Image (tube, rainbow, N blue to C red):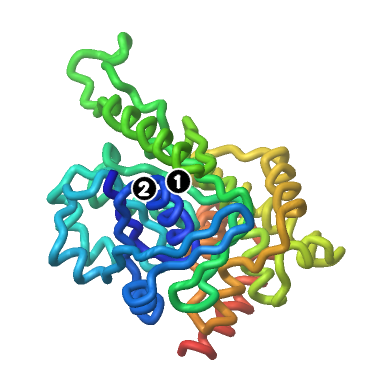
């Protein structure tokens, strides 16, 4: 297959390298010094169970939109920061509309898929998340990754969309019934592709729920790690900060009700245990702060705060950490 990795940073480059090793044609869309290094020296990926150093096809977004057609690709994977989703779709929506290629989001947050679906339609939108993976660019052209590196994905918003008119639907009912059989066939094909490439992929019937469960982890550790400078292991082993991690996870679960989801304390406990027992990694937000890049605050803690406000409930720990980091961001980036 021909795959586009749009946002080929630490996470995107790891999965792209695995797919290229399995024989697929991969186009890495990147920018800056990292792009220049991949074009001149190739891409290096280091993982405890995987090593890669090969020439790759690396281009920038402008070259993609000018010299490629959407329909040339079998799958487009978005692995860029959620802060760039809106600007990407603004620049590329017409390009995307010219083809029928499915778009799989492997981004943080719960708002990317709705934006993508608004551009290209739900039938082409696949929701996904990268879990149990740490992946960062350690120098231009060189990526270091750790963890099992799973991909959980599925049809957006879930596999339970009706594929035929229900018996109890009244004649003349204007409720839209979408046939998503082609979408379900494509996710099974991509699942086989991932597994054959050695990527631990899992298909889910309810990707929206899985995205919120991932947000429980992201809001629990990303902002606090950026504020404290601690990796996930140090954060969850500190008795004071450990409690704050759990509190922010509970606040995230409560916010999910805004989107029609009920996340129980058992969901929070499962995600809390997962991050407590995971490898000691620097969160993406901590790495961004160290490198002077903008933080994904709006798509993580901001998402929780907006929904809690609309629900009329409080999220005091998330609000406090978000405000401190926002003030720091204003000082750093104006």
Q: Does residue 61 appear to the left or right of 257 in the view shown? A: left
Q: What residue is shown with label 1?
A: 128
Q: Secondary structure at mark 1?
A: strand
Camera sees residue 301: no
Camera sees residue 107: yes
Q: Residues within 10 Å of mark 1 (few under 14, many from 20)?
A: many
Q: Which mark is residue 45?
A: none
Instruction: Locate residue 134, reporting x and y percent.
Output: 59, 60
Is 269 placed above or below 281 here?
above
Q: Cβ–Cβ below 8 Å for labels 1 and 2? A: yes
Q: What residue is shown with label 2?
A: 104
Question: How many callouts does the rendering have?
Answer: 2
Q: Secondary structure at mark 2?
A: strand
Instruction: Locate residue 48, reporting x and y percent.
Output: 63, 57
Instruction: Locate residue 312, reporting x and y percent.
Output: 57, 54
- Residue at image x 50%, y 39%? 201
Q: CA distance from mark 1 to mark 2?
A: 6 Å
Instruction: Locate residue 101, reporting x and y percent.
Output: 23, 44
- Residue at image x 78%, y 61%? 236
- Residue at image x 14%, y 55%? 69
Residue 160's quadrant in the figure? top left
Residue 223's quadrant in the figure? bottom right
Quick one: quadrant of the N terminus? top left
Between residue 26 and residue 208, name the one nearer to us. Answer: 26
Q: Residues within 10 Å of mark 2 (few under 14, many from 20)?
A: many
Mark 1 or mark 2, earlier in chain: 2
Between residue 190 and residue 235, name the one nearer to us. Answer: 190
The residue lying furthest to the top in this view is: 167
Residue 186's quadrant in the figure? top left
- Residue at image x 50%, y 43%? 198
């Amino acid at each position: 297959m021909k795959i586009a990795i749009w946002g080929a940073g630490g996470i995107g480059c790891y999965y792209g390298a695995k797919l290229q090793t399995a024989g697929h044609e991969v186009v890495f869309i990147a920018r800056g010094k990292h792009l220049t290094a991949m074009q001149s020296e190739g891409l290096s990926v280091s993982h405890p169970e995987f090593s890669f150093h090969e020439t790759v096809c690396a281009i920038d977004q402008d070259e993609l939109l000018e010299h490629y057609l959407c329909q040339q690709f079998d799958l487009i994977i978005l692995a860029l920061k959620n802060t760039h989703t809106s600007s990407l779709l603004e620049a590329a929506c017409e390009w995307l509309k010219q083809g029928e290629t499915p778009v799989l989001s492997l981004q943080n947050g719960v708002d990317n898929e709705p934006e993508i679906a608004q551009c290209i339609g739900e039938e082409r939108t696949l929701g996904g998340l990268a879990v149990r993976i740490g992946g960062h660019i350690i120098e231009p052209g060189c990526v270091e990754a750790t963890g099992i590196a799973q991909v959980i994905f599925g049809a957006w918003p879930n596999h339970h969309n009706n594929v035929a008119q229900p018996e109890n639907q009244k004649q003349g009912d204007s409720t839209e019934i979408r046939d998503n059989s082609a979408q379900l066939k494509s996710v099974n094909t991509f699942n086989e592709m991932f597994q054959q490439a050695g990527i631990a992929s899992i298909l889910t019937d309810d990707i929206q729920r899985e995205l919120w469960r991932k947000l429980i982890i992201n809001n629990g550790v990303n902002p606090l790690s950026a504020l404290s400078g601690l990796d996930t292991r140090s954060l969850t082993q500190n008795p004071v900060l450990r409690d704050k991690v759990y509190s922010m996870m509970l606040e995230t679960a409560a916010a999910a009700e805004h989107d029609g989801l009920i996340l129980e304390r058992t969901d929070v406990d499962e995600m809390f245990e997962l991050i407590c027992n995971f490898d000691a990694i620097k969160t993406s937000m901590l790495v961004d702060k160290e490198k002077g890049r903008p933080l994904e605050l709006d798509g993580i803690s901001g998402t929780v705060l907006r929904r809690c406000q609309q629900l009329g409930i409080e999220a005091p720990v998330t609000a406090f950490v978000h405000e401190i980091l926002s003030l720091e961001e204003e000082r750093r980036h104006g």
